[in-house]
Every structure is written in structure tokens, then in C-alpha cells.
Image: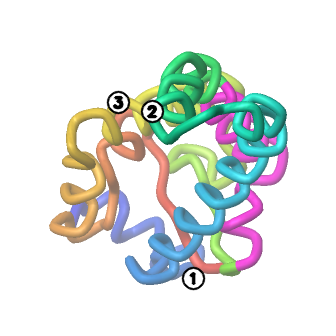
Amino acid sequence: MNEEIENLLHRENITLAETKKRALAFFIDEMLLSFLLIIVLWDSFVSAANMEEIINVTNMFVLEYMFMKIAYQAFFTMQYGATIGKILMKIRVIEIKTVANPNVLSSLNRAIFRIISEMVFYLGFLWGMLDPTRQTFHDKTAKTLVINV
């Protein structure tokens, strides 16, 4: 483990969030955002004649959905240090340098690289499972940690 992070954890008496908690928080956030997308596109889904049309409607809004995910992740991480899923799982994101909620740039960086990790077969998340500090690719780029509350 990185000595700086190890010292920080010991000095501040904090523990890293378990992978299981992070996975459940991810699932909760994805479900919330998916339901929001379904509500917004409900009329288009109902008027679709077949599954192909539903897929086409969904594909038309991929960029908007990605921007929605970035805005959601960045806002909640900056404002509360946690998304709704993380709040429910009693974990939060902190900046390593300040041990506080990430600032605007760190939150935006983290949200953008999180989307990139998802697009590249979730390899950035796998990285976090194998890393001793449990830092995903987006945590590494934003210099953040996910800790227990």
C-alpha cells in the first residue's frame, strides 16, 4: 500500500470502504439513473412498436445519458462526498490531500474517468479490486479514496 495513504488512514483513523459496499452503491446509483431515463423516455417507449424501436430510442440518448451520469456523479461527490448509493451504503469519497469532499475539478475528473472506465469493459473498476488501496482508475486520476463513514 502507498505509504502516504497508509499514514493518512492511520492518522485520521479511517478505513477504506469494502468492495462489496462500493459495488452495491454502484448498483443503486445505476438503478436510480436508469429509472430516471425510463421516466423521461416513457412516451417513446410506450409508442414503440417493437423491441428494435425501443433499442433505437435508447441508443439515440446515449450521450445525454452519459452527461446525466457525469453531472450526477460530479455534483453529489462535490456537494456531499457521496452519491445517493454511497450515502445509503454509508461510504464517501475524500480527496487524499485534504481529507475533505473533492473539489469541483476533482469531482468532475472522477466522474469523467468513471464513464471512461465503464466504456472500457469496466477495467478501471477491476483495477480497484486488485489495488491494495481499493482505488479505481477514476480514484487514481482524481486522487481520491472511498472510505467508510
Mark 2 lies on a secondary structure that is helix
Residue at the image point whose x is 19% and y is 48% from the top: 123
Which residue type carries mark 2? Glu
Residue 9 versus residue 66 in the image, above or below: below
Picture colour scheme: rainbow
**Front position among marks 3 and 1:** 3
Residue bearing the label numbered 3:
116
Dominant SS type (magenta): helix
Tell whether position 71 is magenta: yes
- Mark 2 sits on what residue? 52
The residue to which callout 1 is attached is 13
Where residue 102 appears, x then y in whole percent?
A: 65, 41
The three-letter code of the residue at mark 1 reads Asn
- The residue furthest front is 49
**Region in magenta:** 68-88
Q: CA distance from mark 2 to mark 1?
A: 53 Å
Disc 2: CA contacts within 10 A as few (<14), some (14-19) or many (>=20): few
Left-right relation of 105 to 56: right
At x 62%, y 46%, the residue is 98
